[in-house]
Amino acid sequence: MASGVDILVLINYIIEYMRNNSTTELSADISVLRRRIRGIHDEQLGLLNDMMDCGSMIVGSIYESYRTCSYPNCRCHKGQKHGPFPAISYSVNGKHKSRPIRRDDVAAVQMKALAYKRFQNAIARWRALCEECERLLERIRELSVEHYQ
């Protein structure tokens, strides 16, 4: 087992080796990181433009519902429900809600619901890119910092 002194000697050797032998490798590593950060920035600009130009949105998912009526002898009570009726489901304060959609409004509501999903996906991607960029910047800092001896 190595002693504390042996470990310090090894660490100092590694530091000196890195200073003397890997300056070009270090700058090459940092260049790769910088290029990736620039790529992230370009992707974020595209996402930002998409999010700002999304237009009107509606929260929810479109589905078709089938219903039973109040007439006891109707076919719907024997398994053949009325429908399909377009509807939208969504959550408010953690509670599931749904609303019927007028047939004339189905296409517009679908477009706005899809716009909301695209917006949410763009925000999720934006956050992932921010996290990646932060990790890359942290790595650049690790590679660039020198300790005065």
Image (tube, rainbow, N blue to C red):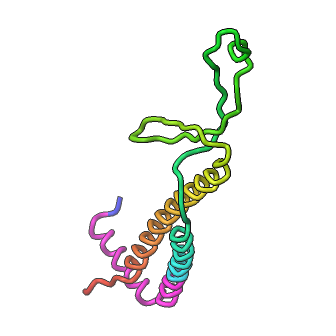
On screen, 57 above or below 74?
Answer: below
Instruction: Please name the predominant secondary structure of the magenta segment in the image.
Output: helix
Q: Please name whichever residue, 118 or 101, is drawn nearer the observer in this view of the structure.
A: 101
Q: Is residue 137 magenta?
A: no
What is the quadrant of residue 67 in the picture?
top right
Q: Residue furthest left?
A: 149
Estimate the x, y position of residue 94 in percent, counting from the top left.
41, 38
In the visual, does 143 lie left or right of 115?
Answer: left
Task: Report the label total.
Answer: 0
* Residue 36 visible to an observer of this rendering: yes
Q: Is residue 28 magenta?
A: yes
On screen, 4 above or below 9?
Answer: above
Residue in the image at 70% along x and 9% along y: 73
Q: Please name whichever residue, 28 or 92, is drawn nearer the observer in this view of the structure.
A: 92
Residue in the image at 55% along x and 70% along y: 53
Image: magenta residue range: 3-32
Estimate the x, y position of residue 69 in percent, counting from the top left.
63, 19
In the visual, does 78 lie left or right of 140?
Answer: right
On screen, 101 above or below 149?
Answer: above
Residue in the image at 51% along x and 72% along y: 48
Q: Quadrant of the N terminus?
A: bottom left
Q: Quadrant of the C terminus?
A: bottom left
What is the quadrant of residue 49 in the picture?
bottom right
In the visual, does 27 lie left or right of 19?
Answer: right
Q: Please name whichever residue, 35 or 124, is drawn nearer the observer in this view of the structure.
A: 124
Q: Residue furthest top?
A: 73
What is the quadrant of residue 100 in the picture?
top right
In the visual, does 87 lie left or right of 2?
Answer: right
* Residue 14 visible to an observer of this rendering: no
Q: Please name whichever residue, 86 or 73, is drawn nearer the observer in this view of the structure.
A: 73
Estimate the x, y position of residue 20 in percent, counting from the top left.
43, 90
